[in-house]
Amino acid sequence: MLKAGIAIRDISPKPGVEMAGYPHCPRPNIGVHDPLYCVALHLDNGRDSVTMLTFDLLYFGKEYCKIIREKFDGNIMFTSSHTHSGPWCSTPLASEIAEGLDNDPTYIAELLPLVEECITEARANMFDAKIATGIGHCGKEQGVGGNRRVKNGLQDDSVNVICVKDMNDTVRGILLNYALHPTFLHAESLVVTADYPAYIRRYLKFAFPEAIFMFAQGTSGNQSSRYHRTGQNFEEAARVGSTLGVEVFHTINKMEFTDDIEIAWKSKEVDLPIRTYPPLEKARADMEAARKRFAEMPDDDYIAKRNAELDMFGRENEFYYAEQFEQTGSVCGGELPCEVLTLKLGDTLICAMQGEVFVEYGLELKAASPVEKTFVFEVTNGSLPGYIFTNEAFDEGGYEVGTSVFTREAGAVLTEAVKSLF
């Protein structure tokens, strides 16, 4: 007989705490538009158990995962929504460190006890449960998501759902895994928000009033709303969140529930290959050239302007990482080696890894998986110093490549490490 426990805590920062996600933008928040949450879901089949935590945060850093794990027995997974309108909670990128941005120690001191409380409550208040998983679809045809490097490019439109009911058939917990950057609110926004997942949560609260909502980010390294949104505002976040909420609702209503599932956890750590940086003066010249291109770009072509801005961000990170390496001999912060894991829940396999990963690798893992229903989580159990991009992206260059400390081989190393756990 499966038992489950679920608990939730509000982890919204106080006004003034800096928000993460956009370079060159000091963003001390001015208040909370919608709360950020930490949610813990504990599952126990009488033989094995797992605790899954989700955060409305950009990342939950590896050092904090270690602190929490040392306080509890059993397997614990930490995964983030990747909202760009919440506080820092991991090692910033080199350009952000150069600007003096970092985790707020007061916020972290308040956050970690809340995470502990969440786990403790979920494990202490378990109920007889049934679980089901299912896959819906929602993508560019509904004006949702898309590839941010290529208009109408490769997308993963799968709406991956885990749902837990009690024995009265009341829905108690819903986890959605979907690949789309939560960047409907841009750098000019100074309010705390979970972005579009907040509106999925709001919709599902009406559909299933007793349910607690969790969001796990898919491989969204090159997935964003850039070519499918009409603006970067709450109206668009609400449209997309509600559209996804409807698909989650329909998916749940098609799923078959069981009170007997296998729970199997496998994990390992892997070193990823680090790139060789150019001489500092060349990196500086490339950065200044990108800054000049952006400054001269007319404002009337929004997409071209944003692409030039991202290229500038990438060149800046390349310079600051080169500078950091020259000064310290390292560019890795505290996030390496990279943890990868698989979690089998009955007929469903979750693959998870740190960092922002291009969608090609998520789709590759799904195709290689021995299990038909395979969900892929990124930004799990830590962050990484930059993106895991494809060979094609490396040849093209751009923001994700410049921002990353990794070589073109890193994606293959990462995916092979996950496959070795199949």
Image (spheres, rainbow, N blue to C red):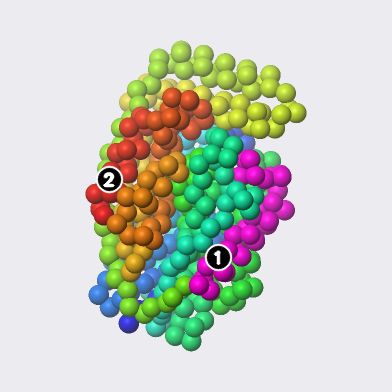
Q: Amino acid at mark 1?
A: Val
Name the residue: 36% across, 42% down.
335
Q: Residues within 10 Å of mark 1 (few under 14, many from 20)?
A: many
Quarter assignment of residue 415: top left
Q: Secondary structure at mark 2?
A: helix
Tell whether position 238 is magenta.
yes
- Closer to us: 239 or 156: 156
**The C terminus lies in which quarter of the figure?**
bottom left
Q: Amino acid at mark 2?
A: Ala
**The N terminus lies in which quarter of the figure?**
bottom left
Picture mark count: 2
Q: Is residue 123 left or right of residue 156?
A: left
First-in-chain label (1 vs 2): 1
Residue at numbered disc 2? 417
Across and down, in percent, residue 39 comes to: 48, 65
Residue at numbered disc 1? 248
Name the residue: 59% across, 37% down.
151
Query: Can residue 85 be seen here?
Result: no
Quarter assignment of residue 359: top left
- Closer to us: 6 or 172: 172
Q: Residues within 10 Å of mark 2 (few under 14, many from 20)?
A: many
Name the residue: 51% across, 45% down.
155
Across and down, in percent, residue 184 comes to: 64, 47
* Residue 402 to residue 42: above or below: above
- Closer to us: 326 or 345: 345
* Residue 345 to residue 379: above or below: below
Q: Secondary structure at mark 1?
A: helix
Which portion, as a residue range, is magenta?
A: 225-254
Name the residue: 63% across, 53% down.
142
Tell me, yes or no, whether the two marked residues, 1 and 2, touch with CB atoms within 8 Å.
no
Q: In this rendering, which labeled residue sits more in front, label 1 or label 2?
A: 1
